[in-house]
Image (cartoon, helix red, strand yellow):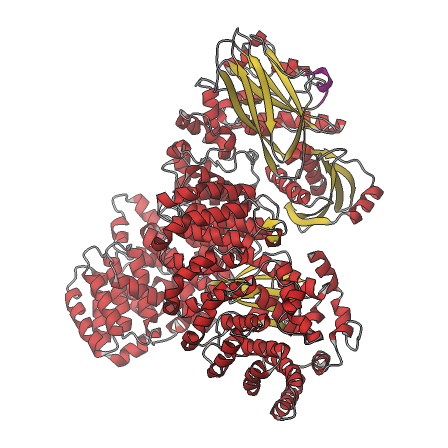
């Protein structure tokens, strides 16, 4: 439909062009309103418009006042008045007439009258009192429309005090025979509840009746009230849980009339409302939560259509699942769902994914780990909204270890935007939490940068607000428990308070002085902080109270052993007593702007020459001194350096300060030392900033972390990503430069998230991907240690490791180290080129390894040798299944399983063997293999019987709702003799394009002396297994392009290689990975075609138009199938990020 | 709950405002100005959500008409609210275009009132909404006997 709207609306500009009567034909241009509108359209300037409207309003005023104006005319006039109001011109004289129209008009005129009232008036307008009687009369009318209109208007504007006057009548309407009346009455009561909750207290029982109404619309309306009620006191409504669950179950199950469907999704609004209610009910209540697990799972499962609305439901469902008492299995599914959001190429879904992540990391910060790289990418996203959402997410995962990096990012974002409210909000709260969390581990320039940011600012209103925000939040912080706050944060607080507390007028400086004095008294406050506090006090002591306080403080600290403190105390003493001097030294506002630092210290020239004349040693540069020192090693400067305030180290006079031997210089500099920020502001800010960044990466931040990466086996990047493991193969071994940077960033951002508990993470029940779920766990820690050196490949590592270590019967396989990782890929790449040039599709081996649970260092040796087998081209590859195969696989006749491949399939490209569920029954081994036929995907299941006895009653069943599966085994499987192998063949095509599907299998069998047994397994198939090249000519391509309606555009990254054009290289990469057919490459554009095996026949085409634009590949996909471009794009994206 | 819904043109001209919460007149003007500048400044293909104060703005462009709604949660749902509204307009006007809304904005308001009430979704069924609008509209054609016209017109 939207297409239609788009098309129609796009024709609008021509219609809108002046003096066109065409479009206005049915729109009564002859009416006065029509004339007015046309008149306005013709005007060019705001001023002229103003003049015209004024004239119009004058005319309206005259007409409404005239006694001869009929109600019918009045209605028309009222519409014009509404129009003028909408344009922003007051027509207050017409308000009373609107009410009159509602009172006296016939139904139709009344309707306009009510509309005008609801548009013109606010709840508080006194005019509304005049309406009460009219409403009452209409509510009691026998005319349905009158009642509807009255209910509509009371649900929008109604004076709170007059609610009792109409309440009984509205209540009565709850039992009205017409649904629409009942529904509107419920909504009116909802409105009353919102504005005056105690007035509707007594009708709660009637709400219940509405909830049980036979009409779903009325029931849905009552949920608005219940959502509010339950939100306020969930305890009182626990008994409703079962009803809500039942209703949701019915809705999800499609039991409601079709009328309630929205784009064939059953009553989505209702679903979402119910999910929200369930969230409140189940929060922190295990018993209640247990009631809803089933229905939650059901809604997750049912919401599968590729439509925004489904995603909206999923989002709400995920939120509910994470709010109620946790259930591992559900959490896992919900997390998977979030994963899909985050990875989606659709920007709205990405946003929602980030939002969902932000929500769920509060429960479990580790959930962000699988998405680190996506998060990093989003941090640099061109859309500022995405960026902001990402920062919000980062804020939630801030901990002591990553705080530095996150703050850097935060500041970067701030510098970039001159933005508004939301930024202030975000940054304000972030900085607070950040400082209190990790203040002491921060490098000094981070608080400095933050303070500078507060201080610099051009846009005065916003800055003022932000400063005020800071002052407010700090004051409230200080009023609380301060002992735990890091020193650095206290310093920031004192500076901000000293500088900006005058912005907060209602707060006298005395209060703040007292708060600061309390800080001084605290035992664990460091000397450095004390000097900051004293500095702040100096700025604040303006009124008598604070002067008295200041004197106390001074007395205590002027005897301090620390010279800096003593200096500060002296300053405070003198300045607090001499207001005039204070005003000169520290002007209340804008001291920063006037501050100039004479970095050459020329004002000391006189003093220096005097000293020199008196025989002092000439000044030596630090460099020189270093040399001197080297010669006489006995002396070291360090003890002196320590006693200086750290803040000084970032200011431009640092060099001089290190010369701690000269007491004069020291005292001079401590006079300057008050605010490192002010000084650093004077010095070049860019260099400072760069310095900061480097240090973040350097000393304590990332680098330190990297070291620990090398010796400790549990670095954050290498944590298992259970969500992704079935979908995302590890990225390539040779990471391009920018990616490496990103990974570094990732590791520093996500440090501390679960790095301590990675082992138990793997042991956790919930994150295991579906097809490994039933595997026993154990022996994982050793495996993950070994995988740690290849950071990217281990995304999916840990869980897979479990399987493998298990599979190999805990045989230890020596780690091959990072170098060998490339081998399988390169090898497969080679063979791949070979096959693709033959035109037969093929999927490379490395990725198979992942799907199969491989690709980690543990079995790297094995993967390296396993070539993707092509009996036709590479007889060697019969090496299958590898030198260290699972013992179970090895026994039957020592023949490779591939030899059991039916002859007709042996010439085709195929994947490696994937072992399936070997744990259940050691004597029976299952493995699967895919063969890529031109018109279908053939899935082969090898059943290996390792015992002497024959297996009977064999039956293999493959199911997947997204796939069309048909069995093509020649003779249906009945039994498998001892030590023999049976192969089952199934052809599989997709019913509907989807990124990835899970094929569930069930093998039932019986041993001679045993019970019937069954083995379950699952196999994941990705869209690309179903993609085949589509050979068309350029001309055919053009025709097809025009006829396809579903399209999608996206920018992808370009692949760069040494000897190829970026475009060719990228397209080749796509071709080899996804079996696309490159139709043509012309200049910077390339056209590519493929088809998806779907249903009967040849499949569904998808065309890609690729253009190189500004270092990215702008891809435009078109297809007759709505879901195909989306899913294919996902794989393109994936393929290119791997290359 | 939604706070307000605005339809405006590509040029930033307001076509239909709907306020679900009481907001002073002066504030309304500021909001309209802010919304149009914020939304119109968005680049194509960026995401359809914006932050505004502590609320979210969800907007969507339908040819020359921009619709935006302000709310606090589930942005995707809001996007569908907008879409459903445009669908309703489309069903009523038949291939709705901006001109329909300009010249018949009171009708557009009536439709909105049947769809959303007090900032909440009241009725999601296209049929039901259009039936109740038609029922009221028919009065324009002829003043029929008040007692039973609803039956003739197949009211729900």
In front of the other: A1009 or A900: A1009
Q: Position of residue A202 (x, y in %)?
A: 37, 65
Q: Quadrant of residue A207?
A: bottom left
In front of the other: A369 or A731: A369
Residue at 56% across, 59% down: B78
Q: Is residue A742 above or below residue A1077?
A: below
Question: Does residue A485 belong to the magenta stretch?
Answer: no
Q: Position of residue A1074 (x, y in %)?
A: 68, 35
Residue at 69% across, 24% down: A909
Q: Quadrant of residue A1077?
A: top right
Q: Position of residue A602 (x, y in %)?
A: 37, 68
Q: Is residue A63 above or below residue A406?
A: below
Residue at 43% across, 57% down: A208
**Left or right side of B128 for A673:** left
Can residue A687 be seen by looking at this rendering?
no
In front of the other: A980 or A486: A980
Which residues, given as a range, are shown in magenta? A902-908
Q: Quadrant of residue A446?
A: bottom left
Which part of the image, by quadrant, shows the C terminus of chain B? bottom right
**Left or right side of A282 for A880:** right
Question: Does residue A907 belong to the magenta stretch?
Answer: yes
């Amino acid at each position: 439909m939207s297409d239609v709207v788009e098309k129609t609306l796009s024709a609008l500009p021509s219609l809108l062009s002046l003096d066109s009567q065409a479009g206005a034909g049915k729109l009564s241009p002859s009416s006065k309103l029509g004339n007015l509108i046309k008149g306005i359209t013709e005007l060019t300037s705001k001023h002229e418009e103003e003049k015209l409207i004024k004239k119009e309003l004058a005319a309206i005023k005259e007409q409404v006042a005239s006694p001869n104006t009929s109600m019918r005319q009045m209605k028309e006039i009222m519409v014009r008045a509404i129009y003028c109001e909408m344009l922003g011109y007051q027509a207050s004289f017409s308000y009373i007439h609107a009410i009159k129209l509602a009172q006296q008009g016939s139904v139709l005129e009344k309707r306009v009258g009510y509309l005008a009232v609801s548009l013109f008036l606010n709840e508080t307008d006194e005019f509304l009192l005049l309406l009460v009687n009219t409403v009452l009369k209409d509510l009691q009318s026998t005319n349905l429309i009158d009642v509807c209109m009255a209910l509509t208007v009371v649900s929008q504007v109604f004076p709170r005090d007059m609610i009792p006057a109409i309440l009984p009548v509205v209540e009565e309407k709850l039992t009205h025979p017409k649904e629409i009346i009942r529904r509107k009455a419920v909504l009116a009561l909802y409105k009353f509840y919102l504005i005056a909750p105690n007035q509707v207290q007594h009708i709660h029982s009637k709400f219940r009746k509405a909830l049980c109404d036979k009409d779903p619309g009325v029931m849905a309306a009552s949920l608005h009230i219940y959502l509010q009620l339950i939100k306020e006191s969930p305890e009182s409504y626990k008994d409703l849980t079962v009803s809500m669950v039942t209703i949701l179950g019915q809705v999800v199950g499609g039991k409601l009339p079709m009328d309630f469907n929205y784009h064939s999704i059953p009553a989505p609004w209702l679903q979402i409302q119910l999910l929200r209610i369930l969230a409140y009910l189940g929060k922190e209540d295990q018993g209640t939560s247990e009631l809803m697990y089933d229905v939650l799972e059901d809604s997750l499962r049912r919401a599968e259509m590729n439509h925004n609305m489904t995603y909206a439901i999923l989002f709400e469902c995920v939120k509910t699942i994470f709010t109620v008492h946790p259930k591992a299995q559900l959490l896992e599914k919900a997390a998977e769902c979030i994963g899909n959001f985050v990875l989606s190429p659709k920007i709205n879904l990405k946003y929602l994914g980030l939002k969902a992540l932000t929500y769920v990391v509060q429960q479990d910060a580790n959930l962000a780990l699988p998405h680190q790289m996506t998060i990093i990418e989003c941090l640099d996203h061109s859309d500022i909204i995405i960026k902001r959402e990402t920062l919000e997410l980062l804020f939630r995962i801030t901990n002591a270890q990553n705080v530095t990096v996150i703050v850097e990012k935060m500041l970067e974002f701030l510098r970039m935007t001159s933005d508004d409210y939301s930024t202030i909000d975000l940054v304000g709260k972030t900085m607070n939490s950040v400082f209190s969390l990790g203040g002491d581990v921060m490098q000094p320039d981070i608080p400095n940068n933050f303070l500078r940011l507060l201080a610099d600012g051009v846009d005065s209103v916003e800055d003022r607000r932000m400063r005020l925000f800071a002052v407010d939040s700090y004051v409230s912080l200080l009023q609380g428990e301060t002992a735990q706050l890091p020193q650095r944060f206290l310093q920031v607080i004192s500076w901000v308070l000293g500088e900006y507390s005058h912005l907060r007028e209602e707060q006298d400086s005395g209060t703040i002085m007292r708060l600061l004095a309390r800080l001084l008294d605290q035992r664990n406050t460091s000397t450095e902080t004390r000097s900051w506090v004293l500095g702040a006090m100096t700025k604040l002591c303006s009124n008598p109270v604070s002067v008295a306080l200041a004197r106390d403080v001074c007395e205590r600290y002027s005897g301090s052993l620390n010279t800096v403190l003593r200096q500060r105390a002296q300053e405070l003493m003198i300045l607090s007593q001499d207001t005039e001097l204070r005003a000169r030294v520290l002007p209340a506002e804008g001291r920063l702007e006037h501050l100039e630092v004479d970095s050459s210290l020329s004002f000391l020239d006189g003093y220096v020459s005097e000293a020199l004349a008196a025989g002092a040693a000439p000044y030596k540069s630090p460099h020189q001194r270093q040399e001197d020192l080297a010669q006489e090693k006995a002396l070291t400067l360090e003890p002196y350096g320590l006693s200086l305030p750290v803040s000084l180290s970032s200011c431009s006079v640092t060099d001089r300060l290190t010369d701690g031997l000269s007491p004069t210089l020291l005292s001079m500099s401590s006079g300057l030392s008050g605010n490192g920020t002010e000084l650093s502001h004077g010095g070049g800010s860019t260099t400072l900033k760069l310095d900061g960044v480097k240090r973040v990466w350097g000393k304590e931040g990332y680098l330190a972390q990297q070291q620990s990466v090398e010796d400790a086996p549990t670095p954050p990047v290498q944590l298992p990503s259970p969500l992704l493991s079935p979908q995302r193969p590890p990225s390539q071994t040779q990471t391009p430069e920018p990616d490496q940077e990103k990974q570094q960033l990732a590791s520093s951002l996500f440090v501390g998230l679960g790095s301590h508990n990675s082992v138990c993470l793997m042991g956790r029940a919930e994150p295991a991907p579906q097809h490994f779920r039933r595997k026993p766990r154990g022996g994982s820690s050793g495996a993950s240690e070994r995988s740690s050196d290849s950071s990217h490949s281990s995304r999916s590592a840990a869980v897979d490791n479990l399987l493998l270590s298990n599979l190999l019967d805990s045989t230890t396989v020596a780690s091959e180290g990072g170098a060998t990782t490339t081998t399988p890929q390169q090898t497969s790449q080679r063979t791949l080129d070979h096959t693709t040039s033959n035109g037969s599709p093929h999927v490379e081996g490395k990725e198979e390894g992942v799907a199969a649970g491989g690709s980690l260092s543990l079995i790297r040796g094995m993967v390296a040798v396993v070539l993707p087998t092509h009996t036709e081209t590479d007889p060697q590859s019969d090496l299958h299944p590898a030198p260290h195969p699972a013992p179970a696989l090895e026994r039957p006749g020592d023949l490779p399983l591939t030899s059991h491949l039916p002859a007709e399939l042996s010439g085709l490209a195929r994947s490696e063997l994937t072992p399936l569920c070997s744990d259940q029954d050691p004597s029976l081994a299952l493995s699967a293999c895919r063969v890529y036929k031109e018109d279908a995907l053939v899935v082969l299941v090898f059943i290996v019987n390792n015992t002497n006895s024959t297996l009977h009653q064999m039956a293999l069943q493959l199911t997947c709702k997204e796939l069309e599966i048909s069995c093509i085994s020649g003779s249906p499987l009945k039994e498998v003799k001892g030590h023999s192998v049976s192969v089952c063949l199934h052809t599989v095509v997709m019913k509907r394009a989807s990124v990835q599907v899970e094929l569930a299998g069930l093998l039932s069998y019986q041993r001679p002396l045993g019970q019937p047994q069954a083995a379950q397994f699952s196999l994941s198939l990705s869209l690309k297994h179903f993609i085949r090249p589509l050979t068309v000519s350029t001309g055919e391509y053009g025709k097809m392009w025009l006829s396809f309606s579903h399209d999608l555009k996206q920018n992808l990254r370009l692949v760069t290689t040494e000897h190829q054009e970026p475009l060719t290289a990228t397209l080749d990469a796509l071709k080899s990975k996804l079996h696309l057919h490159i139709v043509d490459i012309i200049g910077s554009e390339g056209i590519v075609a493929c088809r998806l095996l779907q249903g009967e026949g040849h499949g569904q085409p998808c065309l890609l138009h690729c253009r190189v634009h500004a270092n990215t590949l702008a891809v435009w996909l078109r297809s007759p199938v709505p879901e195909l471009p989306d899913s294919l794009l996902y794989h393109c994206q994936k393929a290119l990020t791997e290359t | 709950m939604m706070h307000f819904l605005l339809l405006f043109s590509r040029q930033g001209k307001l076509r239909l405002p709907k306020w679900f919460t009481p907001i002073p007149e002066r504030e309304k003007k500021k909001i309209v100005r802010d919304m149009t500048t914020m939304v119109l400044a968005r680049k194509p293909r960026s995401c359809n959500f914006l932050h505004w104060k502590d609320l979210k703005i969800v907007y969507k462009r339908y040819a020359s008409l921009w619709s935006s709604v302000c709310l606090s949660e589930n942005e995707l749902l809001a996007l569908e609210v907008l879409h459903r509204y445009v669908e309703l307009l489309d069903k009523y006007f038949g291939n709705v275009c901006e001109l329909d809304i300009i010249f018949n904005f009171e009708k557009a308001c009536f439709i909105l009132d049947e769809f959303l009430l007090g900032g909440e979704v009241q009725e999601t069924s296209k049929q039901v909404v259009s039936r109740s609008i038609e029922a009221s509209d028919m009065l324009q054609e002829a003043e029929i006997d008040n007692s039973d016209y609803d039956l003739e017109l197949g009211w729900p």
